[in-house]
Amino acid sequence: MNEELISIIVPVYNVEEYLKECIDSIINQTYKRIEIILVDDGSTDKSGKICDDYAKIDKRIKVVHKENGGLSDARNVGISVSSGKYIAFVDSDDWVEKTMYKKMYSLCKKYDADICVCGYFREYKDETISKCSSKGVVYKKEDALRELIKGVTIQDHAWTKLYKKSLWEHIEYPVGKGYEDIRTTYRVFQEAGIVCLLSESMYHYRQRKGSIARDGFTNKKIEWLEAIKEMDHDIKENSVEYNDILYKRVKEVECSLLREYFLYSTSKQYKEKYSLAKNLYMDIRKNRNIFLKDKNAMKSFKLISILSCFPMKFTAGIMRCKFIKKYIEKKYVYYA
């Protein structure tokens, strides 16, 4: 089998501590016909120099230096200079298994798939959690989009996927907006025919300090809801087939935001975001059966749905009880 070129795009910004591990893991891929596009997005540390040093020792590496424009802009630049039949993305503080692209490419060729999706590891300081489908599956377009909307078997992350580059002909990441994966991945899936799943975790997603997880009810978190609602609106414009699962996904994010509000908001956040949280709370009260009747719903969603019968101040007090908070944190992994 004649191997086709895969372009692996790595946006880089101030990650000198982790960058070598990332690049080494890509250089050492068992699939050798790759180009590695390192987009230095205006780094102020030694990241840019590290990129240039690697380019001197491996001719497959292409370095682009640009002014800081954010993750979406860096990815778009990477796509624009890529030459591969396939493209993939790696975040510069993460790393990948050496057989990742060999296995994903093989599945794409076997099933004539436009996208291959693999599992991934969440890498915490003292723990590794694998997020992976239990079996390989081949989806037609409609079923793949349905699974993506659900966000369980297939999630929005850019970096767990190998794509045919042709899917991106009319698609770019939204510059200046948060949650770019949510705003973009569904659009790529709408262009795809066949999507296949590799039932192995291949990507290592590093959880660093400074993550937006568990930092309260911030404006950044509210962008999460805005991104989901944007996806909801765009898909509904073209099809009513996904209305039920889109509705549920929106409610899941609303419930997640309430959980953040109750558990982690500072006093200032609690006061500033009270009106928005109150609206979300009343909406969950009206639609609480969506979680109460779902045996697979997260325990925290069920708890908030039950407590929504009571005044919000009462629910906030219950959620912040030491026992309840500890229980929820054991069950809950932030995934946005």
Image (cartoon, helix red, strand yellow):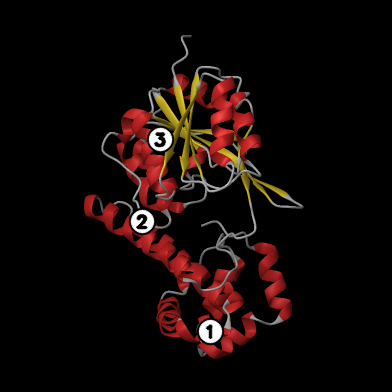
The picture places residue 223, in percent across and down from the top left corner, at: 41, 64
Furthest-left residue in view? Answer: 237
On the question of residue 226 being in view, the answer is yes
Q: Earlier in the sequence, mark 2 or mark 3?
A: 3
Q: Amino acid at mark 2?
A: Gly
Element on which disc 1 rests: helix
Q: From the viewer's perspective, is residue 99 above or below residue 179?
A: above
- Circles 3 and 1 in contact, beta carbons < 8 Å: no
Outermost residue on the right side: it is 126
Residue at 47% x, 19% y is: 110
Q: Is residue 32 above or below residue 129?
A: above
Q: Which mark is residue 268?
A: 1
Q: Which mark is residue 78?
A: 3
* Residue at mark 1 to residue at mark 2: CA–CA distance: 26 Å
Q: Which residue is mark 2?
A: 176
Crowd class of label 1 (few under 14; some 14 to 19; many from 20; radius 10 Å): few
Q: Name the residue: 52% across, 18% down.
A: 59
Which residue is at the front of the view, 287 or 263?
263
Dot 3 or dot 1: first in sequence order is 3
Mark count? 3
Q: Which mark is residue 128?
A: none
Between 155 and 3, the residue placed more toward the observer is 3
Tell me what residue is drawn at x 44 percent, y 16 percent.
Answer: 4
Disc 1 residue type? Lys
Whole-percent x, y for residue 88 in the image: 46, 33
| In front of the other: 262 or 70 | 70
Q: Where residue 28 sits in the image (x, y, percent)?
A: 63, 23
Mark 3 residue type: Gly
